[in-house]
Image (tube, grey):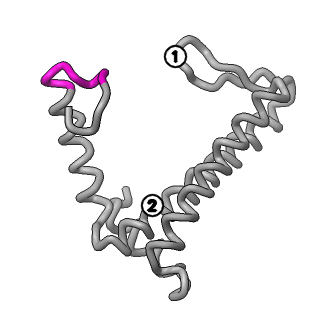
Amino acid sequence: LMKLNEYQERAMQTCMPASMNYSYMMGNLGAEVGEFSGKVHKAQRKGLIKYDEQGNILWTGKDWNEACQFNTELKKEAGDILWQLAGLCKVMGWNLNDVATMNLDKLASRKSRGVIDGEGDNR
């Protein structure tokens, strides 16, 4: 399995020098998240998906090939989001393994203190 730092290093080998800056990475991260969200919401509007009680996407279309294509398109968008996040972390001087580890530690602390469901960054 690939480690996050390896992904970040390999992904940034495809980055053009003019794009290796905070403004580009931050702006496009938001754009990529918007593309992902837009694909999901357009499919919902067209009646192709709905959500179960836990909020998971359920395919309601009759065409299995269309469902597979939709799934593939979402994975591509998720990859674009990951690339932009890797780039943003790179320009901030962070590696993805450290960011992921810090996040898991934060979540474990919140869970152990019973504040996983709450508000505020520093709970």
Question: Dividing the image into 4 quarters, which one contains the N terminus?
Answer: bottom left
Where disc 1 sits, the SS reads loop
Viewer-side residue, 23 vs 68:
23
Name the residue: 78% across, 21% down. Answer: 60
Instruction: From the top left corner, tell me how far across and down residue 32 is, in percent.
Output: 61, 56
Kind of residue at disc 2: Leu
Query: Residue 85 — which label?
Result: 2
The 10 Å Cα crowd at callout 1, few under 14, some 14 to 19, many 20 or more, is: few
Name the residue: 49% across, 57% down. Answer: 82
Kind of residue at disc 1: Gln
Identify the residue at the far front of this view.
120
Instruction: From the top left corner, tell me how far across and down residue 26 is, in percent.
Output: 49, 64
108 relative position to 37: left or right = left
Question: Which secondary structure class fits the magenta region best?
Answer: loop
Query: Residue 54 — which label?
Result: 1
Q: Which of marks 1 and 2 is nearer the N terminus?
A: 1
